[in-house]
Image: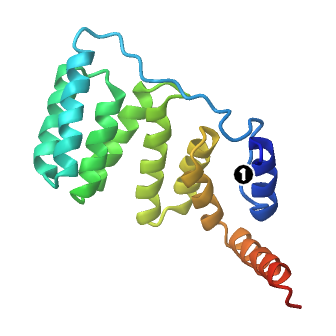
Amino acid sequence: MSSAHDRAVLNQILNPLMPTSDSGPGDVHLEADTVDHPQYTESQQLEKEGVALAEGGKVREALEKFSEAISTCPLNPSAYNNRAQAYRLSQQPDEALEDLNEALRLAGAKSRTACQAYVQRASIWRLQGDDEKARADFAAAAELGSSFAKMQLVALNPYAAMCNKMLAEVFEKVKTGKD
């Protein structure tokens, strides 16, 4: 059985250009959202209902539920993040970006919501062809521990992708005993 450190070393060998941080895998401890507002719990419940609606394909109703959660507790960053996701599903990237900016403003620097919001915002930038902004947001999410963001950073670097492909081919040849 391998340790977390062994897996981190192997991952660095197989993905040499993937960003690393001072902390090893699993060492990034993200804070839960903590909001000092009397209706925060009610807002969270409305969010859960919105998520269920979105998962059921009722995106328009989910948007309404997330908006209600925000009206109930305008300091809840997760509600903005979830509504941004619904806006993305509704092909409304400008509204999604607005909500993601607000989620990031409200969220703590090392919160789960901030990590998710950076990934979402980076994905929108990427779809809009702004790889520089996407790279910056993916880097921020990667620093918060998002493995998806780390993979996207590699994908945004054509030299890293080429190097990883060549390295994978070498390992495959070694594994199969081919020259």
How far across and down, in percent of the image, does residue 122 sit? 48, 53
Horizontal side, residue 99 vs residue 43: left or right: right
> Which residue: 30% across, 55% down?
93
> Which residue: 25% across, 56% down?
89
Q: Secondary structure at mark 1?
A: loop
Quarter of the picture containing the C terminus is bottom right
> Which residue: 23% across, 41% down?
51
As rendered, which of 119 and 94 lies closer to the eye?
119
In this rendering, is residue 40 above or below 19? above
Horizontal side, residue 31 vs residue 59: left or right: right
In this rendering, is residue 23 above or below 175? above
As rendered, which of 155 and 133 lies closer to the eye?
155
Q: Which amino acid type is shown beneath numbered disc 1?
A: Pro
Residue placed under numbered mark 1 in the picture: 19
How far across and down, in percent of the image, does residue 34 sit? 41, 17
Quadrant of the image occupied by residue 36: top left
In this rendering, is residue 33 above or below 37? below
